Structure formats: structure tokens, C-alpha cells
């Protein structure tokens, strides 16, 4: 978890700093406001459980969905008011005077000229045997992830009451991993 967090922090910081070199001042500043604003709002909202205003249910909902709400809000910020002039939509393409946005295709289809369903028999034999190595690693990862997650969820502070299908869940996951893993 820590490695992934460091990678995300490094990549985000690197991109925000590079905007000040590659983009115009207005676009770089808007990108900085969006990046830092999203992080600040997400951190503020996820700490809602300790607030003294609103009901306990409202504070819990805000804390649980705070990061999502922050991301959704700051996705709309570039399209508010005069910020729209700094988006590629207003110019027609991404330039040095616009913020960087994700290029999303207008249709939902594979990015190459193939169908959604591929023929596994077209895969070379060596690739099938080579795929066993990452498959075993992923199987172990899924097994440990499921078990660690279930142990964390069973902590006494959560007051878990094991239902009638509690062990059935472990059995079904085990069978699925055995068949697909």
C-alpha cells in the first residue's frame, strides 16, 4: 500500500510541476488548483466522522463518500465560468494554453481492429505456459487479500455477527480461485 501511495504522490507532483514548464501560467495554475483542491476536499470530507455538526448517519455518509464527491466536484470545476476557456473542449484540441484532460473515445469499442471476443487457440503454446507464473502469483495474492480483508472486517470494534452463509463465502471464493486460478 505504501509503495502505491508513494508512486501516486510522485506522479501527481511531477505532473503538476511539469505543467508550469510545459503549459501557460493560467492552465498550470488551474491544474494546480484542481489537483490540490481535490486532495484537500477529499481529506476534509473523509474526516467528517469527527465533526460535531449533522447527524451521525450524515457524517458517516460524507466520510465514506467524501473522496468520490471531491473528485466529481473538481471534474466540473474546469467547466465553470471562465475556466471553460482553458479546456480543450473550448479550443477543439489540447494545446499549451489548455489543461491536460483524459482523451476518451466517443464510442465503446476495442481500441484495435478486433472483436470483443478473442480466440484463445490463437495464443502461442509458450505463452500459455509462461502465463502460469503470473497466474500463480495472482492466485496467492487473491487468497491472501481475501483472507486479510475478512480478518480486518471481523475486528471486534465492527461488531460483526456471522450469518448463516459466513463460511459458505469462503468456500465459494476457494472454488472460484481453484477453477479460474
Image (cartoon, rainbow, N blue to C red):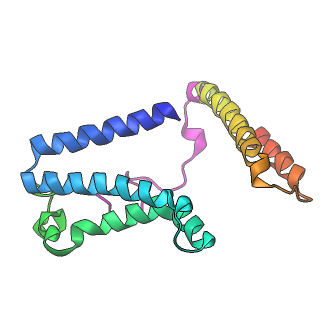
Q: Is residue 133 above or below residue 74?
A: above
Q: Is residue 81 visible?
A: yes
Residue lying at 73% horizontally and 36% vertically, measured from the top left? 143
* Residue 167 percent location from the top left of the image: 89, 49
Which quadrant holds residue 13?
top left
Residue lying at 46% horizontally and 58% vertically, measured from the top left? 67
In the picture, measured across the screen, residue 179 lies left or right of residue 70, that is right
Which quadrant holds residue 99?
bottom left
Which quadrant holds residue 8?
top left
In the picture, measured across the screen, residue 140 lies left or right of residue 124, that is right
In the picture, measured across the screen, residue 105 lies left or right of residue 18, that is right
Q: Front-most of 170 and 138?
A: 170
Q: Is residue 9 magenta?
A: no
Query: Outermost residue, front direction?
Result: 52
Q: Please identify the dominant SS of the magenta region.
A: loop
Residue lying at 57% horizontally and 46% vertically, measured from the top left? 119
* Residue 155 percent location from the top left of the image: 77, 45
Q: Is residue 181 visible?
A: no
> In this picture, which residue range is highlighted in magenta?
102-127
Q: Is residue 104 magenta?
A: yes
Label tally: 0
In the picture, measured across the screen, residue 6 lies left or right of residue 163, that is left
* Residue 80 percent location from the top left of the image: 22, 73
Residue lying at 89% horizontally and 59% vertically, measured from the top left? 163
Amino acid at each position: 500500500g505504501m509503495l502505491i501511495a508513494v508512486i501516486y504522490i510522485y506522479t501527481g507532483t511531477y505532473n503538476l510541476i511539469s505543467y508550469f514548464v510545459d503549459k501557460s501560467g493560467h492552465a498550470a495554475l488551474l491544474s494546480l488548483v484542481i489537483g490540490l483542491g481535490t486532495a484537500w476536499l477529499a481529506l476534509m470530507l473523509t474526516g467528517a466522522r469527527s465533526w460535531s455538526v449533522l447527524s451521525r448517519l450524515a457524517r458517516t455518509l460524507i466520510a465514506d463518500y467524501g473522496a468520490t464527491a471531491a473528485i466529481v466536484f473538481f471534474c466540473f470545476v474546469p467547466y465553470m465560468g471562465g475556466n471553460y476557456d482553458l479546456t480543450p473542449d473550448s479550443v477543439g484540441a489540447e494545446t499549451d494554453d489548455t489543461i491536460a484532460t483524459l482523451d476518451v473515445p466517443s464510442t465503446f469499442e476495442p481500441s484495435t481492429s478486433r472483436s470483443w471476443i478473442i480466440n484463445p487457440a490463437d495464443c502461442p503454446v509458450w505463452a500459455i505456459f509462461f502465463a502460469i507464473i503470473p497466474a500463480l502469483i495472482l492466485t496467492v495474492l487473491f487468497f491472501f487479500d481475501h483472507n486479510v480483508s475478512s480478518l480486518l472486517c471481523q475486528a471486534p470494534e465492527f461488531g460483526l455477527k456471522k450469518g448463516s452463509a459466513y463460511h459458505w463465502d469462503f468456500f465459494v471464493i476457494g472454488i472460484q480461485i481453484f477453477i479460474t486460478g
